Amino acid sequence: MTNCLHLKCKISLAILMTALFSLSLISCGGGEKADRNLSEQTINVVTTIGMITDAVENIGGERVEVNGLMGPGVDPHLYKASAGDVTRMQSADVIFYNGLHLEGAMAELFEKMEKSTLTVAVTAGIAEEQLLSPLEFTGMHDPHVWFDVTLWMDAVRQIEKTFAELDPPHADLYHANAEAYLAHLTKLDASVREQVKVIPEDVRVIITAHDAFNYMGRAYGFEVRGLQGISTATEAGTKDVQELANFIVDRKIPAIFVESSVPRRAVEALQAAVNAKGFAVEIGGELFSDAMGDPGTPEGTYHGMVEHNIHTITKALAGTTK
């Protein structure tokens, strides 16, 4: 697969202009936030991906007002910060982002924001030895940690720790909220493990457009294949499609999956290549990978997103949702 770092950081002129504009705004930012007492006011939080937004809202509760930058269908690998995003971040009391290069073009912006605003990578709460480092990612870590629920729990604890340090008088509240959320996630993890059991071991394979599901594979016993590597900014070539098509035919994998935040064309091309070899593979449904579902729907929460994914995978690979 194409090395995702061989994006050669294909940053467009638009991103560069945004970055320059961002830095000019940050240079005007005030250091007074560090001395502000937040215990008697609502904490203004900016988050990136929906999974972080969900955790922050559950842990912060009524103490926080959360502005999530990346909604349904948004690909964080390719996301470009707007001037409005910069303004929101500049006025925030704390910014939570994933880190591990998930937010691609925004990495330098976060570094500059640290000078005026508390900026936290939630993956800093995960021990490095627990992180995956695929060879095609050239020594860097796979950022899609939320697909191992137990690993994501460490990111949740990082959020709790940050709030407790930012607002010590309410530390007990954040701890109680975090414990309730973590108990919910413990049950979610057990549910996923139970549902995986109905899928025959020889077809426990998740095939999607990009390798977002490696942590899920390690945690719950799936083999994972993707056309585009870790980042959606890479491109799948004809050789990639044909090699994966041969794998599907040889293993008789019944279904492949599209993703809500990635165009369908690569997976549809793969399906066509498999069918041309005389084997019928189905598109088993849509999975949520780098973004969650619409607000107000079950899939618009972290729990609902994970449940949707495992139900979809189970139905497609085992012919059942139980």
Image: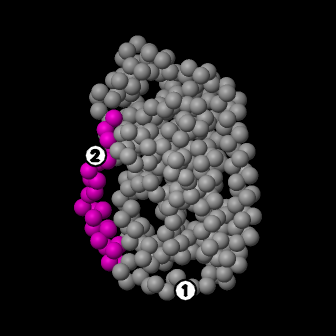
Residue 172 left/right relative to 109: right
Q: Which residue is mark 1?
A: 35
Give the vertical position of 119 relative to 105 (above or below): below
Residue depicted at x 69% and y 49%: 185
Give the vertical position of 109 relative to 251 (above or below): below
Q: Residue 113: x percent and y percent?
A: 42, 72
Magenta stretch secondary structure, dominant:
helix
Type of amino acid under label 2: His
Q: Residue 58: x percent and y percent?
A: 67, 61
Number of other residues with Cα within 10 Å of mark 1, as a class: few under 14, some 14 to 19, many 20 or more: few
Q: Which residue is mark 2?
A: 6
Nearer to the camera, 143 or 293:
143
Nearer to the camera, 293 or 130:
130
**Which residues are the magenta region?**
1-25
Residue depicted at x 37% and y 53%: 78
Q: Quadrant of the N terminus?
A: top left
**Res. 64 in view:** no
Q: Quadrant of residue 318?
A: top right
Residue depicted at x 40% and y 68%: 111
